[in-house]
Image (spheres, coloured by chain):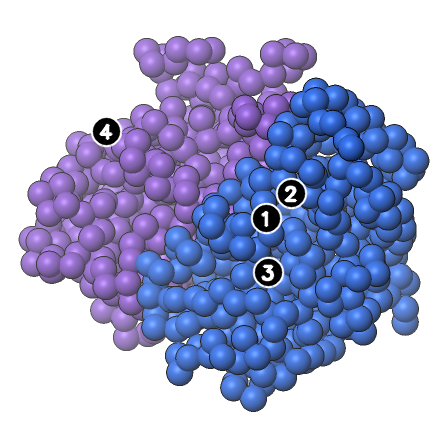
Chain colours: A blue, B purple
Amino acid sequence: MNLDTRLAQIGNRRDPQTGAVSSPIYLSTTYAHPALGQSTGFDYSRTKNPTRQTLEDAIAELEGGVRGFAYATGMAAIAGVFGLLRQGDHLIVSHDLYGGTYRLIEQILPHQGITASFVDTGDVDAVEAAIQPNTKAVFIETPTNPTMRITDLAAVIGVCQRHHLLSIVDNTFMTPYLQRPLELGADIVIHSATKYLGGHNDVLAGLVVAREEQIADRIYFLQNSIGATLGPQDCWLLMRGMKTLALRMERHQENAMVLARWLADHPAVPKVYFPGLLGHPGRDVHLAQSTGYGGMLSFEVEHEDLVEPLLRNLDLITFAESLGGVESLITYPARQTHFDIPEEIRQQIGVTNSLLRLSVGIEHYDDLIADLSAALAAAEQEIGLKRR
Amino acid sequence: MSNLKDTSFATKLLHAGTQTDPVTGAAAIPIYQASTFHQANVDEPPAFEYARSGNPTRAALEEVIAELEGGTRGFAFASGMAAMSTVLLLFSAGDHLIASDDIYGGTFRFLTQVLPRLGIETTFVDTTDLKQIRQAIRPNTKGLVLETPSNPLLQIVDLQGAAEIAKEHGLISIIDNTFMTPYLQRPLDLGIDIVVHSGTKFLGGHSDVVAGLVVVKDAVLGHRIYFLQNSIGAVLGPQDCFLLQRGMKTLKVRMDASQAGAERVAQWLCEQPGIKVFYPGLPTHPGHEVQKRQAAGFGAVLSFDTGSEEKAKRVMARVKLPIVAVSLGGVETILSYPRLMSHSGMPAEERHKRGIGDGLLRYSVGLEDPEDLIRDLAQAFAD
């Protein structure tokens, strides 16, 4: 079955009693046992809830894994997976990853005796060179947030397999509609489902899918023991969002391509990061391992002073954190998502004070261009930028 | 209402955390489903930026629980275990903890199967005996994890005494206040540092929302827990926050009714031959006096030992009113079998050592008429 068909059918035919096409929301925290030692399969909602189960089965099927897990947020999902590590273990991570993951790795894992090396995972040799005797896992984002660097998934997963390391991929930017890392051999896929999967900027959620049973069992143990599970109403909202993922993604990336090209031609925009643009580093690798470019792009403005007036003069595009929703959002990574990363490292990975990240929504692209065009012009005028 | 300091608990329950919608004047807090919030000015971040970091519906709930517990800051989590596990990540590799030996099975599992992997060890002692707490302290002991009344044996820990030991030795004291709720017991007033709740139970009260809450008094501790809540991200969703706050509005009336029912059922059970009853409201209960001193009531949960697995199973098969299930604190009476439910995570040897016998049943009294519950138990006990 095709992926868009699977998406549209999420939760259908799950309720034999009523035939409800939209899966019911089970708020019950606990479940009566038919008799002692007998269970309906559901005992306590932290452990297992029918609505959450429907969602977890759906994401597992979409990503091609054996089992899915739903969490209160994307960070709760990542923290849940990091629970696989123990004191003394070492982790290799993409060096320009999401600020929240960076904070977890830099400020919480060290308390648990877990260390990490940040490397450019786009360079397979650098990944291999960073392996220590106690390295247990490699954590990858591709494309990365916000500079859209590409990692060759098959190559890095190959390194992981040779060295018996867990390979973990944050697939938030691509979604299973465009990229399925488990099919390339990754062990675990993580999502901030708050983003494209939910798609409406109205639900916080995290999802995890494991490729094989043994790891799934460990993840389940941690999910249940730590208890950072997603509530049933949020599970339902997320599934509702996922039903239109294919349509939304097509429109997001169509708009993103138009905007990326327009920005690349704008005199006040020296740099655009979008894997769909010719010349974007790693574009061929990205095309080989996915079926699209997604709806995220970043761009640098000519001068740092343009940022504040640009953001202020935007009427349509919302200045807010987060991404992947139907509404276009603009983010200032240096102050928001990547605030926790020290300036020196930020500069190194291209997250400069002139960089803006755009999550392109499903509005008409002409309106988005008009908004950006007017705000850029107003900003240039305000700071008195003279063009030769 | 802005100043609730001098109001009684019943009033606080209804009026804390509800001043949040000046635009419409809505009596109930709106459910803010937004994941993110527009920022008008890059240099002045708004009160709410991203819903994991802060959400208005969650903020209202967090304000209520802080007010009710007499703390300065509250935190809402995806489940009681998410609350407890986040708090326990205040500790670092090399630290040592002391915990009540008949603590909730889920907390026991986290302390024994998750934290040791991170280099954090726990010693379990009978915390009803303060001497045992003192004796277990090591140079690297950093925290004290308590539950009173405990689950499922309803043992009572002297909170003030335990808090003093913790202060003397620089330990962070943590108490799971789920069984009592702030209506009956306010540990922060007795010197405890952190209160944890499974909000799923009496606070929510309707067996329809899984949630956890944490409250602290100390600002530095509040800051550290906020850092962990935001970084680990095990927060409670807005619809669940709303449901929990809605449930809390009737906490006092529910607790009063359930507690009266529990007292009546406990008395009746005491009159039944071969049944051993665990309920702190009974004058014969070893913790009765301490409980009277530190709490305003005895709660609505009791346990009773039928003597054997066979008898326990017969009661479970025969009862008609309670649902046989895990969990507690709902409007419905819930009968649980700790051996196979809440304490299935605990090895049999450990369980027996803690006095959780194979015939033990836990009975969480709901809002049914106690005489109906007694008639139902009587027919279940009949030969």
Structural distance between the alpha carbons of marks 1 and 2: 6 Å
Residue A351: numbered disc: 1
The image quadrant of residue A333 is top right
Q: Is residue B372 visible?
A: no
In the rendered structure, which amino acid carries the disc numbered 4?
A: Asp
**Is disc 2 placed on a helix, strand or loop?**
strand
Tell me whether circle 1 and circle 2 mark residues in contact (CB < 8 Å).
yes
Q: Position of residue B103 (x, y in %)?
A: 30, 56
Residue depicted at x 71% and y 27%: A385
Q: Kindly identify which chain the residue marked by label 1 belongs to.
A: A
Residue depicted at x 59% and y 28%: B42
Q: Kindly identify which chain the residue marked by label 4 belongs to.
A: B
Badge 4 local density, few (<14 within 10 Å), some, or many (20+)?
some
Looking at the image, residue A137 lies above or below residue A208: below
Q: Kindly identify which chain the residue marked by label 3 belongs to.
A: A
In the rendered structure, which amino acid carries the disc numbered 1?
A: Val
The image quadrant of residue B50 is top right
Q: Which residue is mark 3?
A: A48
Structural distance between the alpha carbons of marks 4 and 1: 47 Å
In the rendered structure, which amino acid carries the disc numbered 2?
A: Leu
Q: Which residue is mark 2?
A: A355
Badge 3 local density, few (<14 within 10 Å), some, or many (20+)?
some
